[in-house]
Amino acid sequence: MATPDDDQPPLSPPLPKHLQELEMTQECRDLISTLPTQRGWVHETIHQYQGFWFETLFMQGVVAFQKHFQADHDTDILLATNPKAGTTWLKAISFALVNRLRYPDTQRHPLLTVNPHILVPTLEIDLYNKREVPDLTTNSFTSRRLFSTHLPYSMLPISAKNSTNCKIVYLCRNPKDTLVSFWHFCNRLRPMSTSTGALSLEDAFDMFCRGSSGFGPYWDHVLGYWKESIEKPEKVLFLKYEEMKEQPIANMRRLADFLGWPFSPEEEAKGVVNDISKLCSFNNMRNLEVNKSGKGSLGQENNIYFRRGQVGDWMNYLTAEMIKKLDRITEEKFHGTGLRF
């Protein structure tokens, strides 16, 4: 005999956290209601706050991070990037560098079993988005406070900018590769249904050029850190993704020197720099089981962070007209700054 439940459709699996409606404070909801909005890359809308664009999902974390973070530790390190500018790679390298005495054996290293985004959490996404005042002392993997952020320099908490001991490392990437990588990444995160579907490259290109991309405009984001690195080279280190790909060893030494943990002659003789480079290489990280099948804090699959990692992949996607327009915008935005790609 049939039961009333027989005619009910099967239950759909729960949406991953990055697609669920976010629980947020009324204060944050009130703020969002006053902000300019545009079409989003993953969700329906993004919001312009203090001159930059953010997904609704991250707004509470952004506000709480600005309001409550205190860079009151002498050894704080902030890794800053535009989304899809080599964030995962920078996290892996930095974690391995500052913890190399704690984990001297790269064959038994946390990076082999734990995704870099867990080892180095992103403040406004992984921590302040979950609790308005999170406990920042509970990371058992590292003896040094090491965090990541996608916020532009102008929006960093005052304590992070004013602290003489809080080091900031910024990694930038060619805007064309950043755009293409971000487009692929967002389409992996979008709910692939008949109502939303994939975001077209044409639409992504248009939004990117207008500056309405996550944590963008891209050019304002890059220039904020570039100018600070020129004025305060002891506090802000500016790295280029393309140069790190071309000379990973030299740039790891540069990063270690900046952080105050240079490689000793003994470490150089033992090949520690090369070991870390191999451990954190794109192919090695991509083929680890945790990065092939694991999931992140928002329910996203870890493998979305390891697509290709190549320099110049934009040539496979952008039209000649798109390339010309992006190059023109970049030349205009960076004119007179001394920044070149």
Image (cartoon, grey):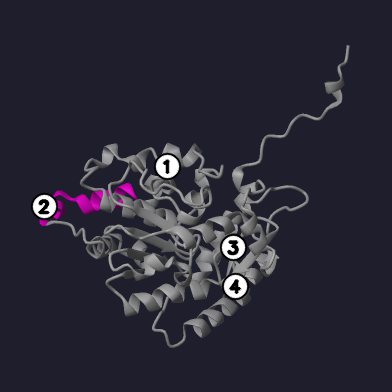
Q: Is residue 248 magenta?
A: no
**Location of mark 1 (residue):** 287
Image quarter in which the N terminus is found: top right
The residue that appears at 40% across and 51% down in the rendered structure is: 282
> Between residues 313 and 76, which one lies in front from this camera angle?
76
Q: Which numbered disc, 3 or 1, marks the residue closer to the eye?
A: 3
**Residue 167 at x, y percent in the picture:** 31, 64
Circle 1 Cα neighbour tier, 10 Å, few/some/many (<14 / 14–19 / ≥20): few
Identify the mark nearer the N-term, 2 or 1: 2
Quarter assignment of residue 182: bottom right
Amino acid found under the numbered disc labelled 4: Gly
User: Does residue 1 lie above or below 335 as drawn?
Assistant: above
The residue that appears at 50% across and 61% down in the rendered structure is: 83
Amino acid found under the numbered disc labelled 1: Asn
Q: Which residues are magenta?
A: 265-280
Identify the mark nearer the N-term, 3 or 2: 3
Amino acid found under the numbered disc labelled 2: Glu
- Horizontal arrangement in the rendering, residue 113 relative to residue 1 (left or right): left
**Location of mark 2 (residue):** 266
Q: Are marks 2 and 1 in contact (CB under 8 Å)?
A: no
**Label 4 vs label 2: CA separation?**
47 Å
